[in-house]
Image: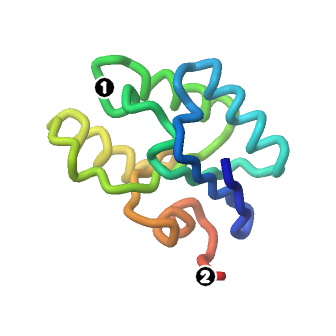
Amino acid sequence: MDTKIIDDIAVVTSEAPLITDARSALDFIASVGYRHKVTKIAINKSVVSEDFFRLSSGFAGEVMQKFVNYGYRLAIIGDFSKYTSKSLRDYMYECNKGQHLYFVADENEAVRKLGGTYEPL
């Protein structure tokens, strides 16, 4: 897991899923949020298990409940074009209109959505 801080946003990348169930979501929040003293986190989509993108599993709701309950905002960065489920597309659309979860194409957009300013290194 690699983490960098842009403004007050932790940007986390990982090749392997770090959030695979509700417990690992809490561990992730503690590991990233508390360590870096942030409440806004951007992750590449490989940080969450593919189950997250199957709404029927209930995993996305369970994970987001943890983030919201603990006062965190989350942006998931990636290419979501391979997901063809209408319900998932609708969920992503509605989330992007809200204030807790965003599905974005790149780090710059994640930082903007979470309220920071992007300055490439």
**Total numbered badges shown on the rendered structure:** 2
Which scheme is used to colour this image of the protein? rainbow
Q: Nearer the viewer, residue 81 or 70?
A: 81
Query: Is residue 48 left or right of 86 when viewed as pictured?
Result: right
- The image shows residue 49 at horizontal and vertical percentages of 45, 31
Residue on which the image places disc 1 = 55
- Which residue lies most toward the front here? 15
- Dot 1, crowdedness within 10 Å: few (<14), some or many (≥20)? some
> Residue 33: which disc?
none
> Residue 120: which disc?
2
- The image shows residue 94 at horizontal and vertical percentages of 32, 45
**How many angstroms separate mark 2 from mark 1 (CA)?**
34 Å
Q: Secondary structure at mark 1?
A: helix
- Dot 2, crowdedness within 10 Å: few (<14), some or many (≥20)? few
- Name the residue type under label 2: Pro
- Answer above or below: position of 48 versus 100: above
Identified at 57% across, 48% down, the residue is: 14
- Name the residue type under label 1: Leu
Identified at 65% across, 52% down, the residue is: 40
Q: Earlier in the sequence, mark 2 or mark 1?
A: 1
Q: Secondary structure at mark 2?
A: loop
Q: Nearer the viewer, residue 7 or 77?
A: 77
Identified at 69% across, 68% down, the residue is: 6
